[in-house]
Image (cartoon, helix red, strand yellow):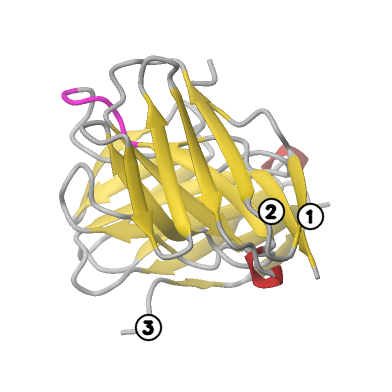
Amino acid sequence: DTGVSQDPRHKITKRGQNVTFRCDPISEHNRLYWYRQTLGQGPEFLTYFQNEAQLEKSRLLSDRFSAERPKGSFSTLEIQRTEQGDSAMYLCASSFSARQETQYFGPGTRLLVL
Amino acid sequence: DQQVKQNSPSLSVQEGRISILNCDYTNSMFDYFLWYKKYPAEGPTFLISISSIKDKNEDGRFTVFLNKSAKHLSLHIVPSQPGDSAVYFCAAPPLIGETSGSRLTFGEGTQLTVNP
Protein backbone atom coordinates (compact mmCIF):
# COMPACT_ATOMS: atom_id res chain seq x y z
CA ASP A 1 0.00 0.00 0.00
CA THR A 2 1.45 3.33 -1.04
CA GLY A 3 -0.50 5.65 1.21
CA VAL A 4 -3.58 7.81 0.96
CA SER A 5 -4.66 8.67 -2.58
CA GLN A 6 -7.08 11.32 -3.78
CA ASP A 7 -8.75 11.88 -7.10
CA PRO A 8 -8.83 14.17 -8.96
CA ARG A 9 -5.76 16.20 -8.03
CA HIS A 10 -7.17 19.33 -9.62
CA LYS A 11 -10.69 20.42 -10.45
CA ILE A 12 -11.87 23.60 -12.14
CA THR A 13 -15.58 24.17 -12.20
CA LYS A 14 -18.08 26.94 -12.75
CA ARG A 15 -20.08 28.41 -9.94
CA GLY A 16 -23.27 26.46 -9.37
CA GLN A 17 -21.93 23.13 -10.58
CA ASN A 18 -21.63 20.02 -8.42
CA VAL A 19 -18.27 18.35 -7.81
CA THR A 20 -17.29 15.06 -6.20
CA PHE A 21 -13.90 14.08 -4.81
CA ARG A 22 -12.69 10.61 -3.89
CA CYS A 23 -10.29 9.48 -1.18
CA ASP A 24 -8.75 6.04 -0.79
CA PRO A 25 -7.23 5.67 2.68
CA ILE A 26 -4.47 3.35 3.83
CA SER A 27 -6.23 -0.01 3.78
CA GLU A 28 -5.73 -0.96 7.44
CA HIS A 29 -6.96 2.41 8.73
CA ASN A 30 -10.52 2.57 9.98
CA ARG A 31 -10.65 6.33 10.54
CA LEU A 32 -10.91 8.76 7.64
CA TYR A 33 -10.86 12.55 7.85
CA TRP A 34 -11.61 15.39 5.46
CA TYR A 35 -9.96 18.78 5.86
CA ARG A 36 -10.00 21.98 3.84
CA GLN A 37 -7.04 24.28 3.44
CA THR A 38 -7.09 27.81 2.06
CA LEU A 39 -4.12 30.00 1.25
CA GLY A 40 -2.13 31.06 4.28
CA GLN A 41 -4.07 28.86 6.67
CA GLY A 42 -3.59 25.46 8.17
CA PRO A 43 -5.93 22.60 7.31
CA GLU A 44 -9.39 22.93 8.89
CA PHE A 45 -11.36 19.88 9.94
CA LEU A 46 -14.55 19.14 8.00
CA THR A 47 -15.71 15.65 8.98
CA TYR A 48 -14.54 12.19 10.00
CA PHE A 49 -15.61 8.58 9.67
CA GLN A 50 -15.02 5.57 11.85
CA ASN A 51 -15.45 2.71 9.40
CA GLU A 52 -18.66 3.63 7.52
CA ALA A 53 -20.15 5.80 10.27
CA GLN A 54 -19.82 9.59 9.99
CA LEU A 55 -19.25 10.54 13.61
CA GLU A 56 -18.46 14.23 13.55
CA LYS A 57 -19.08 17.18 11.26
CA SER A 58 -17.65 20.67 11.55
CA ARG A 59 -19.89 23.70 11.33
CA LEU A 60 -17.81 24.50 8.23
CA LEU A 61 -19.65 21.66 6.50
CA SER A 62 -22.69 23.48 5.16
CA ASP A 63 -25.78 21.78 3.75
CA ARG A 64 -24.19 21.87 0.31
CA PHE A 65 -21.49 19.46 1.45
CA SER A 66 -22.02 15.75 1.89
CA ALA A 67 -19.57 12.97 2.59
CA GLU A 68 -19.94 9.22 2.47
CA ARG A 69 -17.89 6.16 3.20
CA PRO A 70 -20.31 3.43 2.14
CA LYS A 71 -18.25 0.31 2.81
CA GLY A 72 -15.81 1.68 5.29
CA SER A 73 -13.08 1.89 2.67
CA PHE A 74 -12.97 4.79 0.19
CA SER A 75 -14.84 8.03 0.82
CA THR A 76 -16.41 10.69 -1.37
CA LEU A 77 -16.95 14.36 -0.65
CA GLU A 78 -19.57 16.11 -2.76
CA ILE A 79 -20.12 19.84 -2.98
CA GLN A 80 -23.40 20.92 -4.54
CA ARG A 81 -24.01 24.33 -6.14
CA THR A 82 -20.38 25.34 -5.75
CA GLU A 83 -19.52 28.89 -4.77
CA GLN A 84 -16.31 30.82 -5.31
CA GLY A 85 -15.64 30.59 -1.58
CA ASP A 86 -15.38 26.82 -1.92
CA SER A 87 -12.09 27.23 -3.78
CA ALA A 88 -9.52 25.49 -1.61
CA MET A 89 -7.37 22.40 -1.23
CA TYR A 90 -9.41 19.46 0.06
CA LEU A 91 -7.30 17.02 2.04
CA CYS A 92 -8.10 13.51 3.15
CA ALA A 93 -6.30 11.72 5.96
CA SER A 94 -6.57 8.31 7.57
CA SER A 95 -5.46 6.72 10.80
CA PHE A 96 -6.00 3.86 13.19
CA SER A 97 -8.51 4.31 15.98
CA ALA A 98 -6.64 5.98 18.77
CA ARG A 99 -6.72 9.54 19.99
CA GLN A 100 -3.04 10.19 19.51
CA GLU A 101 -2.65 8.09 16.39
CA THR A 102 -0.79 9.81 13.57
CA GLN A 103 -2.92 10.90 10.65
CA TYR A 104 -1.52 10.28 7.17
CA PHE A 105 -2.58 12.73 4.50
CA GLY A 106 -3.21 12.33 0.81
CA PRO A 107 -1.93 14.81 -1.78
CA GLY A 108 -5.19 16.75 -1.81
CA THR A 109 -7.63 17.91 -4.46
CA ARG A 110 -7.27 21.54 -5.44
CA LEU A 111 -10.64 23.04 -6.36
CA LEU A 112 -11.05 26.27 -8.26
CA VAL A 113 -14.54 27.65 -8.67
CA LEU A 114 -14.85 30.28 -11.40
CA ASP B 1 -10.95 31.17 18.31
CA GLN B 2 -7.47 30.14 17.17
CA GLN B 3 -6.40 27.56 19.74
CA VAL B 4 -3.08 26.78 18.06
CA LYS B 5 -1.17 29.72 16.67
CA GLN B 6 1.99 30.17 14.67
CA ASN B 7 2.86 33.84 14.66
CA SER B 8 5.66 33.78 12.12
CA PRO B 9 4.43 33.24 8.57
CA SER B 10 7.96 32.82 7.24
CA LEU B 11 11.53 32.07 8.30
CA SER B 12 14.71 32.13 6.27
CA VAL B 13 17.97 30.48 7.40
CA GLN B 14 21.29 29.52 5.91
CA GLU B 15 22.12 25.92 5.16
CA GLY B 16 23.85 24.27 8.11
CA ARG B 17 22.41 26.66 10.69
CA ILE B 18 19.59 26.02 13.15
CA SER B 19 15.95 26.60 12.23
CA ILE B 20 13.57 27.31 15.10
CA LEU B 21 9.85 27.25 14.40
CA ASN B 22 7.46 28.35 17.12
CA CYS B 23 3.90 27.51 18.08
CA ASP B 24 1.68 28.78 20.89
CA TYR B 25 -1.53 27.29 22.20
CA THR B 26 -4.30 28.67 24.36
CA ASN B 27 -5.74 25.64 26.13
CA SER B 28 -3.53 24.25 28.88
CA MET B 29 -5.45 20.97 28.69
CA PHE B 30 -3.87 20.06 25.34
CA ASP B 31 -1.69 17.05 26.07
CA TYR B 32 -0.24 16.04 22.73
CA PHE B 33 1.17 17.94 19.81
CA LEU B 34 2.34 17.09 16.32
CA TRP B 35 4.43 18.80 13.67
CA TYR B 36 3.70 18.30 9.99
CA LYS B 37 5.71 19.41 6.98
CA LYS B 38 4.07 20.33 3.68
CA TYR B 39 5.66 20.72 0.28
CA PRO B 40 3.76 22.52 -2.51
CA ALA B 41 1.18 20.35 -4.27
CA GLU B 42 1.50 17.62 -1.62
CA GLY B 43 -0.40 16.77 1.52
CA PRO B 44 1.09 17.35 4.97
CA THR B 45 3.62 14.75 6.12
CA PHE B 46 3.99 13.81 9.77
CA LEU B 47 7.33 14.87 11.20
CA ILE B 48 7.47 14.50 14.97
CA SER B 49 5.20 14.57 18.01
CA ILE B 50 5.41 15.20 21.73
CA SER B 51 3.30 14.25 24.69
CA SER B 52 2.78 16.70 27.54
CA ILE B 53 4.44 14.28 29.95
CA LYS B 54 7.71 15.16 28.21
CA ASP B 55 9.40 18.47 27.56
CA LYS B 56 11.58 17.28 24.70
CA ASN B 57 11.45 14.73 21.91
CA GLU B 58 14.23 14.16 19.43
CA ASP B 59 14.36 12.38 16.08
CA GLY B 60 17.56 12.83 14.12
CA ARG B 61 17.93 16.45 13.09
CA PHE B 62 14.50 17.35 14.50
CA THR B 63 13.80 18.18 18.14
CA VAL B 64 10.56 19.45 19.59
CA PHE B 65 10.52 21.29 22.91
CA LEU B 66 7.41 21.82 25.01
CA ASN B 67 7.10 24.56 27.63
CA LYS B 68 3.79 23.88 29.34
CA SER B 69 3.90 26.89 31.65
CA ALA B 70 4.29 29.20 28.65
CA LYS B 71 1.94 27.11 26.48
CA HIS B 72 4.59 27.14 23.83
CA LEU B 73 6.33 24.57 21.69
CA SER B 74 9.13 24.85 19.23
CA LEU B 75 10.65 22.71 16.50
CA HIS B 76 14.41 22.84 16.07
CA ILE B 77 16.08 21.62 12.89
CA VAL B 78 19.85 21.19 13.11
CA PRO B 79 21.57 21.39 10.72
CA SER B 80 19.10 22.88 8.28
CA GLN B 81 19.22 21.64 4.69
CA PRO B 82 17.75 23.13 1.51
CA GLY B 83 15.41 20.11 1.29
CA ASP B 84 13.84 21.23 4.57
CA SER B 85 12.30 24.21 2.76
CA ALA B 86 8.57 23.69 3.24
CA VAL B 87 5.61 24.91 5.27
CA TYR B 88 5.60 23.57 8.83
CA PHE B 89 2.40 23.18 10.82
CA CYS B 90 1.94 22.45 14.48
CA ALA B 91 -1.25 20.63 15.40
CA ALA B 92 -3.09 19.29 18.42
CA PRO B 93 -5.77 16.57 18.76
CA PRO B 94 -8.99 17.29 20.68
CA LEU B 95 -9.09 17.26 24.45
CA ILE B 96 -9.80 13.99 26.22
CA GLY B 97 -13.54 13.39 26.22
CA GLU B 98 -14.26 16.24 23.81
CA THR B 99 -14.98 13.94 20.90
CA SER B 100 -14.62 10.33 19.94
CA GLY B 101 -12.38 11.19 17.03
CA SER B 102 -8.95 12.68 16.65
CA ARG B 103 -9.57 15.71 14.46
CA LEU B 104 -6.49 17.89 14.45
CA THR B 105 -6.45 21.63 15.07
CA PHE B 106 -3.66 23.18 13.02
CA GLY B 107 -1.74 26.41 13.31
CA GLU B 108 -1.49 28.71 10.30
CA GLY B 109 1.90 27.37 9.28
CA THR B 110 5.40 28.81 8.87
CA GLN B 111 7.15 28.82 5.51
CA LEU B 112 10.76 27.79 6.08
CA THR B 113 13.31 28.64 3.42
CA VAL B 114 16.80 27.20 3.77
CA ASN B 115 19.27 28.98 1.54
CA PRO B 116 22.30 27.10 0.14
Please, which chain is the residue tagged with disc 1 on? A
Q: Is mark 3 on a helix, strand or loop?
A: loop
Q: In this view, does B16 lie to the left or right of A49?
A: right
Callout 3 crowding tier (Cα within 10 Å): few <14, some 14–19, many ≥20 = few
Amino acid type at circle 2 is: Gln
Q: Give the range drawn in magenta.
A: B93-97
Task: Please tell me whether the stretch drawn in magenta is mainly helix, strand or loop.
Answer: loop
Contact, mark 2 vs mark 3 (Cβ under 8 Å):
no
To which residue does mark 1 refer?
A: A14
Mark-to-mark CA distance, 2 and 3: 32 Å
Q: Position of residue A34 (x, y in %)?
A: 43, 50
Q: Is mark 1 on a helix, strand or loop?
A: loop
Say if residue A79 shows up in the picture.
no
To which residue does mark 3 refer?
A: A2
- In the image, residue B72 above or below residue A105: above
Amino acid type at circle 3 is: Thr
To which residue does mark 2 refer?
A: A17
Q: Position of residue A6 (x, y in %)?
A: 49, 70
Q: Position of residue B45 (x, y in %)?
A: 48, 62
- Residue at 61% x, 31% y: name it: B6
Mark-to-mark CA distance, 3 and 1: 33 Å
Callout 1 crowding tier (Cα within 10 Å): few <14, some 14–19, many ≥20 = some
Contact, mark 2 vs mark 1 (Cβ under 8 Å):
yes
Where on the picture, by quarter, is residue A41?
A: top right
Amino acid type at circle 1 is: Lys
Q: Residue B4 carries which label?
A: none
